[in-house]
Image (spheres, rainbow, N blue to C red):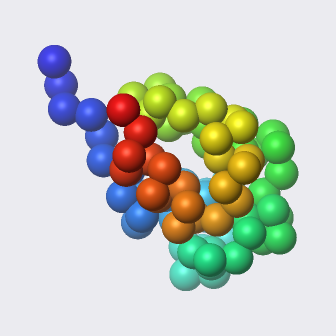
């Protein structure tokens, strides 16, 4: 069985920057991603991408924790 991909903070920042059409340096780790322009459609695309890579998360898991720091913690502890 192949190793599951790593959901590092760097990867999360890059993936979020991609869906927001911005540079990774412009994405805040602590500010709500909703305030940074993330909408439900973009959030769902991230969930689908990460689930395809082995993450066991849901849309609600991420929506309830709207910062990248919280997402990193969640993905680090998800089974």
Point 83% across, 70% down: residue: 35
Check the picture and name the quadrant holding the C terminus.
top left
Name, please, the residue furthest toward the top.
Answer: 1
Q: Classify residue 48 by image quadrant.
A: top right
Point 44% across, 34% down: residue: 55
User: Is the residue 25 above or below the residue 71 in the image?
Assistant: below
Looking at the image, which is closer to me, 24 or 30?
Answer: 30
Point 65% across, 46% down: residue: 62
Q: Classify residue 4 by image quadrant.
A: top left
Q: Is residue 23 visible?
A: yes
Q: Is residue 45 visible?
A: no
- Spot occupied by residue 9 in the image (x, y as percentages of width and height): 42, 64
- Spot occupied by residue 65 in the image (x, y as percentages of width and height): 67, 55
- Spot occupied by residue 59 in the image (x, y as percentages of width and height): 69, 36
Q: How many marks?
A: 0
Residue 34 falls left or right of residue 67: right
User: Is the residue 56 above or below the residue 23 in the image?
Assistant: above
Point 37% across, 50% down: residue: 76
User: Is the residue 48 above or below the residue 16 in the image?
Assistant: above
- Spot occupied by residue 69 in the image (x, y as percentages of width and height): 53, 67
Looking at the image, which is closer to me, 66 or 45?
Answer: 66
Residue 9 falls left or right of residue 31: left
Check the picture and name the quadrant holding the N terminus.
top left
């Amino acid at each position: 069985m192949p190793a599951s991909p790593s959901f590092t903070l760097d990867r999360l920042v890059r993936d979020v920057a991609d869906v927001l059409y911005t540079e990774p340096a412009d994405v805040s780790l602590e500010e709500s991603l909703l305030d940074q322009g993330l909408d439900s459609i973009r959030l769902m695309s991230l969930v689908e991408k990460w689930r395809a890579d082995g993450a066991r998360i849901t849309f609600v898991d991420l929506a309830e924790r709207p910062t990248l720091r919280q997402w990193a913690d969640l993905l680090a502890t998800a089974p």
